[in-house]
Amino acid sequence: MVKVGIRRRSFKGSFSAMTKGRATRSFKRAIIPGYGKRGMGWLHPKRKIYNQIYSRTTVDSRKLFSTGRPRRTNHSTNSGSNQTWGWGMLLLFLLVGLAIVYWKVVLVVIVVLGVVLFLKD
């Protein structure tokens, strides 16, 4: 099952990736040919497909609050996939989440507004 929504980041995992992960990756790059190169993900097709779907159906929680310019990439064309998410998207996720949690209240409000607007005429 693929996750959808906002990714919950772990400080422990981030710290591990910055310290031990960096050393491990540099060690593997020196020993394993092709490690860390583009296109090598297809050596594990199940993992590659899962990671692609996961990155497209979830949003990085740190990018929700950033209002700065997107980071530069080495690609010659910018497809717009690395644009930062602003406050508007955060508000949209919040409203959708509240509507899902409090769906009974939302339904009552819609019915009351419908009755008020119907009786107004």
Image (cartoon, grey):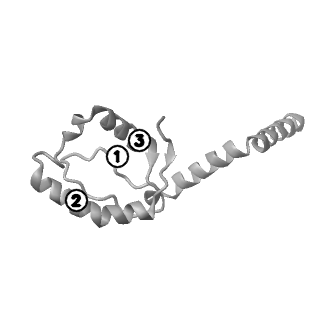
Say whether residue 97 is left or right of residue 120: left
The structure residue drawn at horizontal position 37% and vertical position 66%, both measured from the top left corner, is: 15
Spatial separation of the CA atoms under disc 2 and disc 3: 24 Å
Query: In terms of sequence position, does the residue under pointer 2 or pointer 3 come before the other?
Result: 2
Determine which quarter of the picture holds residue 49: top left
Say whether residue 69 is left or right of residue 99: left
Judge the density around disc 1: few (<14), some (14-19), many (≥20) Cα neighbours within 10 Å: few
Residue 94 place in picture, x, y as percent? 61, 52
User: Please, is residue 67 above or below residue 96 in the view?
Assistant: below
Identify the mark at residue 81; answer none if there is no mark: 1
SS category of the residue bearing label 3: helix
Determine which quarter of the picture holds residue 101: top right
User: Please, is residue 22 above or below residue 2 in the view?
Assistant: below
Q: Which of 66 and 24 is in front in this view?
A: 24
Q: Mark 2 points at which residue?
A: 24
State yes or no: discs 2 and 3 in contact (Cβ < 8 Å): no
